[in-house]
Amino acid sequence: MPKERRSPGPAPRPAPGGLDEVDRKLVQLLTADGRMANNALAEATGIAPSTCLTRVRSLRERGVIRGFHADVDLGALGQPLQALIAIRIGAHSRDEIDRFRAKVPRLPGVLSLFHVSGANDYLLHVSAATPDALREFVLDHLTADPAVSHAETSLIFEHIRGS
Amino acid sequence: MPKERRSPGPAPRPAPGGLDEVDRKLVQLLTADGRMANNALAEATGIAPSTCLTRVRSLRERGVIRGFHADVDLGALGQPLQALIAIRIGAHSRDEIDRFRAKVPRLPGVLSLFHVSGANDYLLHVSAATPDALREFVLDHLTADPAVSHAETSLIFEHIRGS
DNA sequence: GATGAAACGGAGCAATA
DNA sequence: TATTGCTCCGTTTCATC
């Protein structure tokens, strides 16, 4: 059977970021299932396995794909609580802010740190084993930090991933 | 060589969630690198490859590991902008709220939807191609939604993953 | 760049201890 | 569980187009 043909029409898309249709499909497939076998990837995108290997490697080398990670149920790991903590930084030296920025992502339970515009400076996504552990985390690592002027904790009732 | 021994002391941890030390190490390794080969996993945890296979499969079946996903640079995909949108729900029927909750995660560019405690009801993490696209997203899908009473957008300057 | 064939290595299974 | 042995499939390289 001949290769599947693009229906006649406008030129093959300008390709944002230098990615063609196949690249984007590979990215989409690997986002949905990061362990999909190279074989299956090749078939799903209509290219040869060897070509597929080259493509995926190129995507990683170019930094389009940064890595692959297991999606873990934190509750099963004994961390059933999650919270988002809005943080305001007091007027301080750049060094102090940098220190804060470097320290926080390594704290236990930290899932993500967002530097945001608006009334708050940072939004911190954390997990914790118990309400007490969460409270301790905030007091020990945030309230006590000289760079932090205000920290407001919101519990996460539910976290739904996008498409 | 004899198996590595735990140093004398308290009993082998109670294992939160029914996971032993090996399970937790497997989870940790697969969180760091979701494509790690079964061979390497076995060696890193000090168990036999066949056992390792069983362990990992069990972790997936028990839902401890939910899946594997590629971590993608959205900028390279033509979506260089990210935002967090704080959403307040007006007093409405449960049905309407459920409809909102079901609709939002499927909207284009949506990365995560958090249902949170506090002044805001939801926090929406989205990506967009341009400021205009973001503005349109908010107007079309959030402001225009009858369930939404207020939406406040904060641009994300930087997003750092935790440990 | 993309491809097919061939060499290589890992995955997965079963029998056993 | 660990071990062994075996098959099968996927991965990877390379010459070629």
Image (cartoon, coloured by chain):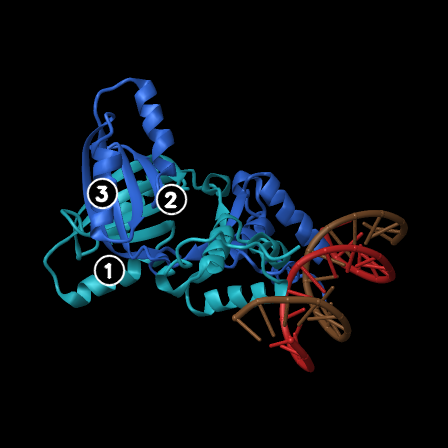
Chain colours: A cyan, B blue, C brown, D red
Which quarter of the rendered picture does the C terminus of chain A lie within?
Answer: top left
Quick one: label 1 or label 2, which is nearer the N terminus? 1
Question: Is there CB contact under 8 Å for labels 1 and 2?
Answer: no
In this rendering, position of residue B39 left or right of residue D5: left
Distance between the Cα atoms at labels 2 and 3? 33 Å
Mark whose residue sits in front, 1 or 3: 3
- Secondary structure under tag 2 reads strand
Residue visible at 33% across and 59% down in the picture: B75
* Chain letter of the residue carrying label 2: A
User: On screen, A34 above or below A133?
Assistant: below
- Residue designated by label 2: A127
Marks 1 and 2, Cα distance to the nearest angstrom?
A: 19 Å
Q: Amino acid at mark 1?
A: Phe
Q: Are marks 2 and 3 on the same chain?
A: no
Which amino acid lies under the numbered mark 2 shown in the image of this protein? Ser
The residue lying toward the viewer, choosing from B17 and A1, is A1
Task: Kindly report the distance in space between the C-alpha atoms of the residues bearing marks 1 and 3.
Answer: 34 Å
Which residue is denoted by mark 3 in the rendering?
B136
Q: Is residue A130 visible?
A: no
The foreground one among A130 and B97 is B97
